[in-house]
Amino acid sequence: MKVRVKWVQDVMFVGESGSGHAVVMDGPPEGGGRNLGIRPMEMLLLGTGGCTSYDVVSILKKSRQPVTDCVAEVTAERAETEPKVFTSIHIHFVISGKGLSEKSVARAVSLTAEKYCSASIMLAQVADVTHDFEIVEVE
């Protein structure tokens, strides 16, 4: 895997993925930026949310569960001093479907947390990473 990050100006950068996608990263005005892009640490959380959601949906589909939506709400706290690493991360899944098995959803969340999501498992080496879920029944 390879990415490229190019400095644009001030504290703005463009990240380019090996798969051909790009994203703008920038800082807040008090940090020398113009608030024109996502913060790099937010990118880290977004990637974690995407990684773990990918696993949950994939596991539920393989289990033939009628999943129609999956939202991962990721919240985190950072250390007060430099380096301001994440100290805790919580991932709350809102899983929607008709007749979803609570046992199957719990299993999918457990598997992503303990076995499959490289991002959250890696971050768990330095932060307390927790997961929970709710099921929304749809008509």
Image (cartoon, rainbow, N blue to C red):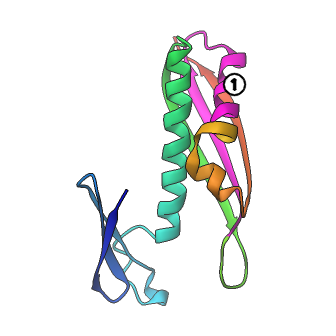
Q: Please identify the quarter of the rendering in which residue 103 is found.
A: top right
The vertical placement of 108 against 118, above or below, is above
Q: Position of residue 37 (x, y in %)?
A: 36, 70
User: Which amino acid is tagged 1?
Assistant: Arg
- The residue positioned 65% from the left and 58% from the top of the image is 123
- The residue positioned 65% from the left and 81% from the top of the image is 83
Residue indicated by mark 1: 107
Q: Residues within 10 Å of mark 1 (few under 14, many from 20)?
A: some
The vertical placement of 62 against 36, above or below, is above
Q: Which residues are magenta?
A: 86-112
| Residue farthest toward the left in the current orientation of the protein | 20
Q: Position of residue 65 (x, y in %)?
A: 55, 13
**Magenta includes 105?**
yes
Q: Please identify the quarter of the rendering in which residue 29 is found.
A: bottom left
The vertical placement of 20 against 86, above or below, is above
Q: Position of residue 110 (x, y in %)?
A: 70, 33
